[in-house]
């Protein structure tokens, strides 16, 4: 039985806010077939955050894109291209931090009233 290789995603940061999906597709198509592009947007306002994920068709094209396009100028910024981390890798790097318990505060006496003892 053949084992199917998992396609690697590429993480791109420092992208100009004027850049479009078509601009990224043209840039990365130089290195091979672009499977998908996911431009990250703000959930509340829907504005582009300046980062994206690009999925190439195989690992060789992924490595070539990372080596060739890291530091490339796109519109008016130099983009940073690196392999995307999986959820498992992210969990190892930044484990979930437990928050300290909330401290209870003393209630304040409203102004103009005397404190009853």
Image (cartoon, rainbow, N blue to C red):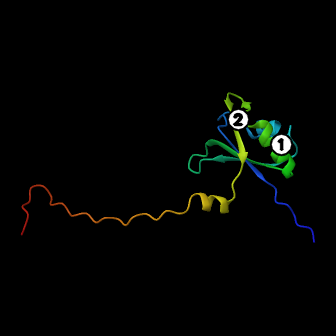
Q: Quadrant of the N terminus?
A: bottom right
- In three-dimensional space, the C-alpha distance between marks 2 and 1, rounded to whole angstroms, equals 22 Å
Determine whether 62 is above or below 90 in the image.
Answer: above
Residue 70 on image: x %, y %: 74, 37
* Mark 1 secondary-structure assignment: helix
Q: Is 112 on the left or on the right of 108, as rendered?
A: left
Residue under label 2, please give it. 19
Q: As rendered, which of 21 and 2 lies closer to the eye?
A: 2
Instruction: Name the residue furthest top.
Output: 76
Location of residue 76 in the rendering, given as x and y in whole percent from the top left corner: 68, 27
Task: Identify the residue at the far bottom of this view.
Answer: 1
Instruction: Classify residue 82 as left or right of residue 7.
Output: left
Q: Is residue 6 left or right of residue 49?
A: right
Please identify the quarter of the rendering in which residue 52 is found: top right
Front in this rendered view, residue 117 or 70: 70
Residue 78 lies in what quarter of the image? top right
Sequence-first tag of 2 and 1: 2
> What residue would you read off at disc 1?
64
């Amino acid at each position: 039985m053949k084992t199917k290789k998992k396609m690697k995603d590429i993480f791109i940061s420092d992208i100009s806010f004027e850049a479009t999906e078509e601009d990224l597709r043209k840039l990365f198509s130089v290195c091979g077939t672009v499977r998908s592009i996911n431009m990250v947007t703000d959930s509340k306002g829907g504005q582009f955050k300046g980062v994206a994920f690009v999925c190439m068709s195989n690992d060789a094209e992924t490595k070539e894109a990372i080596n060739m396009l890291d530091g490339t100028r796109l519109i008016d910024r130099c983009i940073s291209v690196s392999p995307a981390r999986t959820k498992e890798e992210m969990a190892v790097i930044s484990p979930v931090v437990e928050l300290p318990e909330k401290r209870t505060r003393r209630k304040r006496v409203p102004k103009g009233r005397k404190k009853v003892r």
